[in-house]
Image: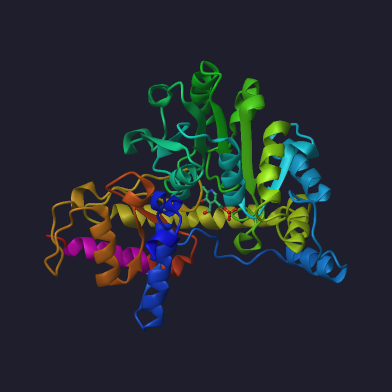
Amino acid sequence: MSDFLSRTLDRVKPSPTIMISAKAAELKAAGRDVIALSAGEPDFDTPDNIKAAAKAAIDAGKTKYTAPDGITELKRAVCSKFKRDNGLDYTPDQVSISSGGKQVLYNALMATLNPGDEVVIPAPYWVSYPDMVLLAGGTPVVADTSIQTGFKLTADQLEAAITPKTKWLIFNSPSNPSGAGYSAVELKELTDVLLRHPHVWVMTDDMYEHLAYGDFKFCTPAEVEPKLYERTLTVNGVSKAYAMTGWRIGYAAGPKHLIGAMRKIQSQSTSNPSSVSQWAAVEALNGAQDYIETSRPVFQDRRDLVVDMLNKAEGITCPTPDGAFYVYPSIADCIGKTTRKGVEITSDEVFATELLEEEGVAVVFGAAFGLSPNFRVSYATSSEELTDACTRIQNFCARLK
Ligand SMILES: Cc1ncc(COP(=O)(O)O)c(C=O)c1O
């Protein structure tokens, strides 16, 4: 039977975050008291104005195929968004709309990678980047960051990762899984390196743009270094910004020839993203933006709660991130210790497995994101649940010997 399946499958693994969330759901269904801190989606409902726009689109019969890479109205809304939030000028023919940011990134890699092409991916990374690169026939080149630099890539590390075969740098700020956000100064140090390597393009995943806390100010490569405009694909979406994960709308803007190549891939695979979702996204981008402002302080309070409680857990060090809704604590001081049941914590995967087993808290182990020994907590859930979960983590750690 294995002969029947494509060898492409040998190159990729299933998403560990989806697997862990499924495992937590399974335990819950079996009656276990489980708190899942593994999902990467806001716990808020989609705002009413957006839902109303979708209902109106259905009633108006906007339920047919659209242009394969999106309706002009949404492309125009994307152009306005880039101008308003990022000071970037794009025209609708420089914009591509897909079923989520995930498909945008996938299309771009499929449209550009040839065997041997390298893609620099700073670790810890969003789980899908390396696998998407592999699916598209390229070679991921992982550049490790460290907790000392706040999980941010330095100019020297970027310089060292670039070879004549490098095609892309995938850049993600604020980051999933670390929450790290690059200031304009830090980002400029990276774009200066890219200016010295004209063959390298940057695919910037700005999905968590609006989830930025305290003094941190979001910025994006083409804004910080306009000379990179011609070799930047700026990717964003409505999933995280407007609590619209299930609607599946992501978008990107970049050079016309790249957008055209991505359109070609999409037109022969999925064609247009849901027409109704596209109209909802028009309202998300053009309508009132108050959801962003009301949800941000809630997330920030939760971040502070989680960071504070995790730092009180024995053996855990948790930096305070600038954005997104994740923290990425280190468990370096837990390695080598033994659980109540006598299991030695040899890795972050063992830590996460035993934590789920003993305390019913589901987190994602750091190896899934390419940097250990850490784990990711998603704090997109209520303060009550977070307090309960962090107390359980403290109890788990206190019992380690
Ligand atoms: C960094 C990052 N990029 C892209 C995505 C994809 O988002 P979507 O496909 O829902 O737009 C996610 C979702 O978890 C993410 O965390």
Give the total of numbered labels: 0
- Relative to residue 103, is residue 26 drawn left or right? left
Decide whether the magenta segment is chiefly helix, strand or loop: helix
Give percent across and percent down for residue 215: 53, 38
Residue extending farthest right: 60
Give percent across and percent down for residue 21: 42, 66
- Relative to residue 224, is residue 396 drawn left or right? left
| Rendered image coloring scheme | rainbow
State the extent of the magenta-drawn residues as a range: 388-399
Point 57% across, 51% down: residue: 102
Q: Residue 361 occupies which quadrant of the picture?
A: bottom left
Q: Quadrant of the N terminus?
A: bottom left
The one of 46 and 58 positioned closer to us in this rendering: 58
Give percent across and percent down for residue 192: 52, 19
In the rendered structure, does residue 394 fall within the stretch colored magenta? yes
The one of 181 and 10 positioned closer to us in this rendering: 10
Q: Residue 254 occupies which quadrant of the picture?
A: top right
Q: Residue 150 occupies which quadrant of the picture?
A: top left
- Relative to residue 394, is residue 68 drawn left or right? right
State whether residue 21 is above or below residue 10.
below
Residue extending farthest bottom: 31
Give percent across and percent down for residue 344: 14, 59
The one of 344 and 213 positioned closer to us in this rendering: 344
